[in-house]
Image (tube, helix red, strand yellow):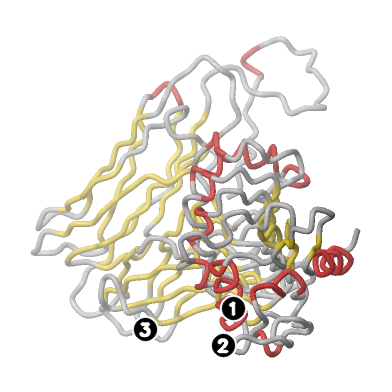
């Protein structure tokens, strides 16, 4: 049965009914709170410009210019349960709604308390998803896909008994709230989060969302922030910024680098890498001998499956300085370490000796090696004392009995004091001391002499 057929039937049933016993039943009508909530939604989304607003402002009218309470169930997009005198569904999909859903944050006390379906998809709605939706206790279908909604998914939706939720194709960003894992009534393929900027570090939540997501994979189309942002070589007027590319590279996009001379901003867009496969860009036009604070974000431009440009959250802030003035430059080099050595030792070197103590922050960053499994994350403040020219940074390496291919991790320098960063990232290659891993498909060697076994590194250099 179509929406219009249902609305027509509801309109007929709203007429005065005369029973055989001679009892006159009142005309069907929803509550005043329901009507008030619908009018607020109409005004907030420019209802006069909807493609179809039939019934909403048609005779007989109340003093506020909208149809009387007894006519609500004949308004376009409204479906009621005439037996229980309640408003069941709001279906205004593809109807040119343009505005904000703020009225759903401040509903009258008993408004929409029987609502089961809210479908406002494929419109031009802006702003955030209303926190007030968590009060709609009977809601089972929330359909908001293909709008211009932004911000985070509000907490509280997990308290509902949703059986279907579709939020794809918006500009939603940030961590997915953990309470979505409580939506046990969602069936396979009854969730759609694609083409947003959402993420989670909660393995249990990720697995739950995958089990409900249509196609089983909600993360592969998320525009998330680039990871492992670090600084490469600096010059008098430029700083090289390096990062790891995001997984979602299919649709066109870019990476943006913002800089400030003050920690915490305000930041200015300084460079754009116009390809999501890029992993570095040079920020130019900078002042010599100046410390800069940098952060990044990713963007995916509008495409077939999303009419919006989608921006990720920003990365954390890092710092670097251009060369110049009396500041010495500090660099860190690449190293190779055998697993049984139990430690990887990086050396940080200054290009000139300073009469001041030089300090910097250092922290390991993952590559193909895994924290805890292959090495132990290490961070802190390093110091090169006045009159000295180098310092050592030691990272514990995990020695196990499992044959492994060569693996890598990074040591990243930032926040220099009394110095500038020339080379801020060093790579450590962990070489396994167990038997080498033979690549799949390789022919077995007939030579059994272990002295003839050699390692072939697969790490990118």
**2 and 1 marks in contact (CB < 8 Å):** yes
Residue 84 or residue 311, whichever sits in front: 84
Element at badge 1? helix
**How many angstroms separate mark 2 from mark 3 (CA)?**
60 Å
- For image coordinates 47% across by 42% down, the residue present is 409
Q: Do the residues labelled 3 and 1 touch (CB within 8 Å)?
A: no
Q: Does the residue at mark 2 contact the one at mark 3 (Cβ under 8 Å)? A: no
Looking at this view, is 312 or 322 the one in front? 312
Residue 82 visible to an observer of this rendering: yes
Counting the numbered discs, the total is: 3
Separation (CA) of disc 2 from disc 1: 10 Å
Q: Is residue 411 above or below residue 260?
A: above
Residue carrying label 3 = 286
Query: Between tags 3 and 1, which lies in front?
Result: 1
The mark nearer the N terminus, 3 or 1, is 1
Which numbered marker is on residue 64? 2
Q: Given this view, does label 2 or label 3 mark the residue nearer the observer? A: 2
Label 2: which secondary element: loop
Q: Splitting the image into 4 quarters, where does residue 357 fall?
A: bottom left
Classify residue 401 as left or right of residue 419: right
Q: Where is residue 17 in the image (x, y as percent from the top left)?
A: 80, 63
Q: Distance between the residues labelled 3 and 1?
A: 54 Å
Query: 10 Å neighbourhood of mark 1: few (<14), some, or many (≥20)?
Result: some
**From the viewer's perspective, is 264 left or right of 431?**
left
Label drawn at residue 39: 1
């Amino acid at each position: 049965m179509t929406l219009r057929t249902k609305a027509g039937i509801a309109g007929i049933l709203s007429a005065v009914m005369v029973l055989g016993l001679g009892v006159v039943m009142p005309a069907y009508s929803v509550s005043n709170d329901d009507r008030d909530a619908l009018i607020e939604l109409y005004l907030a989304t420019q209802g006069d410009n909807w493609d179809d607003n039939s019934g909403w402002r048609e005779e007989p009218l109340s003093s506020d210019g909208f149809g009387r309470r007894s006519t609500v169930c004949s308004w376009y997009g409204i479906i009621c349960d005439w037996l229980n005198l309640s408003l069941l569904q709001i279906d205004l999909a593809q109807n040119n709604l343009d505005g904000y859903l703020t009225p759903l944050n401040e509903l009258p006390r008993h408004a929409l308390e029987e609502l089961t379906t809210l479908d406002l998809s494929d419109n031009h709605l802006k702003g955030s998803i209303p926190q007030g939706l968590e009060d709609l206790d009977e809601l089972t279908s929330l359909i908001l896909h293909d709008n211009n909604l932004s911000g985070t998914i509000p907490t509280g939706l997990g308290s509902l008994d949703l059986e279907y939720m579709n939020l794809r194709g918006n500009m939603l960003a940030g961590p997915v709230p953990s309470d979505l894992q409580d939506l046990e009534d969602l069936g396979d393929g009854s969730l759609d989060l694609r083409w947003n900027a959402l993420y989670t570090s909660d393995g249990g939540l990720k697995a739950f969302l995958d089990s409900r997501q249509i196609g089983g994979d909600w993360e592969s189309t998320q525009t998330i922030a680039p990871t492992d942002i670090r600084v490469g070589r600096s010059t008098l007027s430029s700083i090289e910024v390096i990062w790891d590319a995001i997984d979602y590279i299919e649709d066109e996009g870019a990476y943006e680098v913002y800089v400030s001379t003050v920690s915490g901003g305000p930041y200015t867009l300084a460079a754009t890498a116009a390809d999501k496969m890029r992993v570095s860009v040079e920020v130019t036009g900078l002042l010599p001998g100046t410390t800069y604070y940098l952060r990044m974000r990713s963007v995916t431009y509008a495409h077939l499956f999303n009419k919006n440009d989608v921006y990720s959250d920003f990365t954390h802030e890092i710092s670097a300085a251009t060369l110049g003035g009396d500041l010495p430059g500090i660099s860190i080099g690449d190293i190779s370490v055998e697993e049984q050595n139990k430690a990887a030792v990086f050396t940080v070197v200054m290009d000139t000796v300073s009469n001041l103590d030089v300090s910097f922050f250092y922290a390991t960053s993952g590559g193909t090696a895994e924290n805890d499994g292959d090495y132990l994350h290490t961070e802190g403040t390093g110091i090169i004392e006045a009159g000295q020219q180098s310092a050592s940074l030691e990272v514990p390496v995990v020695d196990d009995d499992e044959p492994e291919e060569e693996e890598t991790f990074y040591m990243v320098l930032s926040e220099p004091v009394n110095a500038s960063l020339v080379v801020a990232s060093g790579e450590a290659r962990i070489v396994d001391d167990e038997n080498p891993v033979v690549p799949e498909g390789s022919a077995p060697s007939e030579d059994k002499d272990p002295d003839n076994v050699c390692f072939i590194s697969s790490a990118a250099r």
